[in-house]
């Protein structure tokens, strides 16, 4: 587990990779495509304005929040046991010299010298990028060389392998919104490396120990689907930008806010066959909640974030969203094979 705060004041929050699954109560009609069903639904239902409800923190200071280490003092048994292996906790992690991406970086004569400067690794399962602190508050530099995962735990270098160097602005311009905590879009800085509890649970009131309903995403709180979707979509939508900063992530989003007051999402990507099924799945179902007022299911209906499990997904009936990843009539244990490529992230 890694929580590295850049201020003396602590901070709290943690989740971000929960892909949304919202399904209708009716069964999937085999002679209609997902796009046709969505189009028909649009014709019969007035679309909502995604920005018409709630509040935002645009132009305000990032709230002082409780650091995840303090959260785990009370939640060490229910959350702490799984948080160490949760993918959300590894969006950025310390650059252990035994990591296969680091071994790949040291294996080339052109990149071996600069490997000594690497302090952090961004990503892991498909691609690893290399980072170092710049010495400025809330800033990281991104190496122009990446490591792409091959078979097993082997990695192969890509990017500017022959002439590696550090980019001092790219992390702030492209990555910080989904790979750091307490991000201030106005000056493109962050408070904490990686995901702290604040990312998903917001500015937790100290009284939440006695009144758990004060805490966003608490089981005692029963947040509305649009609130849950806003929290997950802040990182899982890769097709949009902030109205206020024009950056590809929302400006000072706090859990409980309406993400779409500031973030403009391209919901047409839900029907784009050129993007990966995973991204289409997110876009389809975020659209279903924020435009069509789906109150049935959210990301958390299928994804147990702290338990790193999607077991609930297998219990749902077939619906129009299923065919984005699964062939009609087939077991949910098998899904269509695809490669993930992100224009935003560059992998």
Image (cartoon, rainbow, N blue to C red):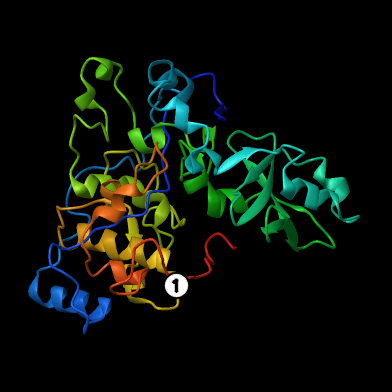
How many residues crowd around disc 1 within 10 Å: few (fewer than 14), some, or many (20 or more)? some
- Looking at the picture, tell me which residue is in the foreground, 343 or 274: 274
Q: Is residue 338 above or below residue 136?
A: below
Q: Is residue 201 above or below residue 210?
A: below
Identify the residue at horizontal 39%, vertical 45% (top origin): 309
- Looking at the picture, tell me which residue is in the foreground, 217 or 262: 217
- Looking at the picture, tell me which residue is in the foreground, 327 or 13: 327
Q: Is residue 273 above or below residue 227?
A: below
Residue at far right of view:
109
Residue beneath disc 1? 275
Identify the residue at horizontal 38%, vertical 77% (top origin): 272
Left or right placement of residue 335 versus residue 258 in this view: right
Using the rendered view, name the quadrant where residue 255 is placed.
Answer: top left
Q: Is residue 343 above or below residue 245?
A: below
Left or right placement of residue 56 versus residue 343 in this view: left
Where residue 131 appears, as percent x and y from the top left, is 68, 44
Where residue 269 appears, as percent x and y from the top left, is 36, 71
Query: Which secondary structure, mark 1?
Result: loop
Using the rendered view, name the quadrant where residue 43 is placed.
Answer: bottom left
Where residue 281 appears, as percent x and y from the top left, is 35, 64
Identify the residue at horizontal 86%, vertical 49% (top origin): 112
Residue 166 visible, this angle: yes
Q: Quadrant location of the C terminus? A: bottom right
Count of number-bearing discs: 1
Residue 10 visible, this angle: no
- Looking at the picture, tell me which residue is in the foreground, 55 or 345: 345
Left or right placement of residue 217 versus residue 142 in this view: left
Q: Quadrant location of the N terminus? A: top right
Where residue 57 appears, as percent x and y from the top left, is 32, 40
């Amino acid at each position: 587990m890694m929580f590295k705060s850049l201020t003396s004041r602590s901070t709290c929050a943690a989740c971000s990779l929960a892909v949304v699954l919202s399904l209708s109560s009716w069964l999937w009609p085999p002679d209609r495509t997902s796009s046709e069903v969505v189009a028909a639904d649009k014709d019969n239902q007035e679309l909502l304005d995604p920005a018409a409800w709630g509040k935002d923190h645009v132009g305000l200071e990032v709230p002082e929040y409780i650091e995840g280490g303090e959260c785990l003092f009370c939640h060490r048994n229910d959350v702490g046991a799984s948080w160490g292996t949760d993918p959300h906790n590894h969006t950025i992690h310390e650059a252990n010299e035994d990591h296969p991406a680091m071994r790949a970086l040291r294996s080339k004569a052109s990149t071996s010298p600069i490997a000594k400067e690497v302090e952090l690794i961004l990503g892991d399962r498909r691609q690893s990028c290399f980072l170092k602190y710049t010495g400025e508050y809330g800033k990281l530099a991104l190496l122009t060389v990446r490591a792409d995962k091959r078979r097993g735990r082997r990695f192969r270098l890509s990017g500017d392998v022959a002439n590696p160097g550090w980019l001092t602005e790219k992390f702030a311009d492209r990555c910080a919104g989904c790979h750091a905590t307490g991000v201030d879009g106005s000056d493109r800085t962050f408070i904490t490396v990686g995901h702290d509890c604040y990312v998903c649970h917001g500015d937790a009131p100290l009284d939440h120990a006695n009144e758990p309903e004060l805490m966003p995403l608490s089981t005692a709180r029963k947040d509305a689907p649009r609130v849950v979707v806003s929290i997950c979509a802040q990182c899982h939508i890769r097709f949009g930008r902030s109205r206020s900063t024009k950056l590809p992530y929302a400006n000072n989003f706090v859990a409980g806010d309406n993400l779409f007051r500031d973030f403009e999402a391209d919901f047409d990507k839900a029907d784009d066959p050129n993007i990966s099924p995973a991204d289409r799945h997110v876009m389809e179902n975020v659209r279903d909640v924020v435009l069509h007022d789906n109150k049935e299911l959210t990301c958390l209906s299928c994804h147990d974030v702290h338990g790193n499990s999607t077991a609930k997904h297998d219990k749902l009936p077939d619906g129009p969203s299923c065919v984005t990843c699964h062939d009609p009539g087939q077991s949910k244990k098998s899904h269509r094979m695809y490669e993930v490529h992100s224009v935003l992230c560059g992998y």
